[in-house]
Structures are given as structure tokens and as C-alpha cells.
Image (cartoon, helix red, strand yellow):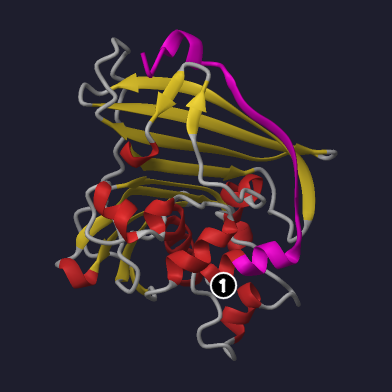
Amino acid sequence: MPIDPEVAIGATVAAQDVEWSSSDVLLYQLALGAGNPPTDPGELRYAYEQDLHVLPSFAVVAPNLRQFEPPALSFPGVEIDLAKVLHGGQEITVHRPFPAAGGAHATTRIVDVQDKGKAAVIVQETTMTDAAGPVCTARSTIFARGEGGFGGHRGSSQRAEPPQREPDVVADSPTWPQQALLYRLCGDRNPLHADPAFAEAAGFPAPILHGLCTYGVVCKAIADTALGGEVHRMSSYAARFTGVVFPGETIRTRIWQEGGGRLVATSSVLERDEAPVLGDIVVTTTG
């Protein structure tokens, strides 16, 4: 049986010491599209090591920076074909501003396995700590098509519906045709994002942009427009992946201020009649 929730839930997937440098942060943020135009001070804060601002979404990829092989879904109680897998959702909570260089111990565990009938949902949680205490907590949801029906619980669905009014901010983020080829150097070598034949076998007409790249692009858009570039104010950022982006498309993000330090947002692709790509986006802020 490919999924055994009794074995999987609570199992440690990985425990490792993680290190990152300003070069890692710069590569990640350039792969999101930072630095355009290259003389804009607002862009240089992400693309130049002087007074480097670190997007909180970098904390999600930091544990996988040195991963040079395609990922596998072979964990205690879980054995899934990579071609059936999509990223369902991602959440990051930073307990203090993420440093531009440093190290931490990262532990990843499976915290839930849900049976959606035709699909399985696997929830992983990664905690990073250093000598000063907790750095961040990341929770990812993996959606595995055709792997449901194993008798597990269905789980709950959380929705963050935007207000019934015009958004307070609208931000457009263009992507470029080769963006997935650059972003994969940040640690995700899934061939779905580079190999046309693999993408076709998975049901897509062409390689798609990494979900976490879209996640980072939207994080930057929210920080730049709704927070004036003050990335240190973002204490948590959650989103559900509702569609795909093909490299070269434009991501439009609509943002609503709800008060109390809470923002909600949606993201879509302009070139395909605003097909949704991220939903249930919630950002909590401080200050």
C-alpha cells in the first residue's frame, strides 16, 4: 500500500543542519524576478548585498538549497510517484526577521495525512532553530493525484475569502520564459519544471513554474506594495495553490487590508483570462 497513515503521521522525514549565505538569498530573490529595473533602490534591496532585505518566503527553501537530485516521495508510510504530485499549499511563520546569512537545525515531520477520495494530502512541518531559539516554522501540503482511498480521515478545509469590495492594492508581476530553469537552482530539481516530455506525461502542455516560485513572487509583490518593502513586518504568510503558471506569464495579485495586521489576497494569470494560481492568501503583520 503506498500510504499508511498510522506509520506516516509523526514520522521524521529529515533532520539536518542548514547553512545559508547572502549569495543564497541573492540567487533566490533574483530567481523570483528581483532586480528589475537594476537601478531601482526598491529592487536593489533584494538583489544587492548592501542592506540586503530577506523575503520571509526564503525560509521555506533554505533547508533544500543543497539538494541537487530530483525530490522523491518515499517516506515512512508514504510511497508516491513524483509525476502524480502537486504542491497544495504553503505556510511560513517567522519568529524573528530571517537573517541574510546564518545557520540552524531543521527538523521535518509528517503531521497529517488526509484521504480526499481521489487524492491524498500529506502535510509536512519543518521547524528551524538556532542558538537563540526558534527561527521559523514552515508547513507544506502535498497533493497526490490518484493516491486516495486508503481509509484515512478527510481533513478540514480552511478558506480565506476576500472582502466583497475592490482590492486596496493590485500588483502585476511578469515572469520570464527561462525563470523555472533559474529557480530550480534554489533546490527543487523536479523535472516537471524543466523537461517538456516529463511535463507532458504529467498532463501539462509544457513545464510549469515551481509553485514555490509563484509563492515567492507573490510574497514580494505583497511586501513591495502593501508594506512598502518592509519585509520584517511579515510574521506569517500562507497560500493555497489553485492553478499553475507557465513561465512568461504575468501574475496579478489583488490585496485587501482587513485591519489588525491581517491582509488577504488572491493571485491569477492575466494571459489566461485571470485563471487562479494562488488562493486563500493570508499575511499577518507586525507594527
Task: Give the residue at x 39% y 41%.
Answer: 89
Residue 277: percent from the left, percent from the top? 29, 55
Q: How many marks?
A: 1
Q: Few, some or many C-alpha atoms within 10 Å of disc 1 (few <14, some 14-19, many ≥20)?
A: some
Task: Give the residue at x 57% y 80%.
Answer: 43
| Quarter occupied by residue 252 | bottom left
- Identity of the residue furthest to the front in this view: 197
Residue closer to the observer: 227 or 82: 82
Residue closer to the observer: 154 or 197: 197
- Identity of the residue furthest to the bottom in this view: 39
Quadrant of the drawing holding the C terminus: bottom right
Residue 265: percent from the left, percent from the top? 34, 56
Question: Compared to 222, does 132 lie above or below?
Answer: above
- Does residue 23 show up magenta in the picture? yes
Q: Secondary structure at mark 1?
A: helix
Residue closer to the observer: 280 or 25: 25
Residue 275: percent from the left, percent from the top? 19, 60
Query: Can you see residue 34?
Result: yes
- Identity of the residue furthest to the right in this view: 131
Task: Give the residue at x 76% y 60%.
Answer: 21
Question: Compared to 33, does 197 lie above or below?
Answer: above
Q: Mark 1 = which residue?
A: 30
Q: Is residue 192 rendered to the left or right of residue 18?
A: left
Residue 191: percent from the left, percent from the top? 42, 53
| Segment colored magenta | 1-27
Amino acid on which the number 1 mark rests in the picture: Leu
Q: Is residue 88 rendered to the left or right of residue 213?
A: left
Task: Give the residue at x 64% y 62%.
Answer: 54
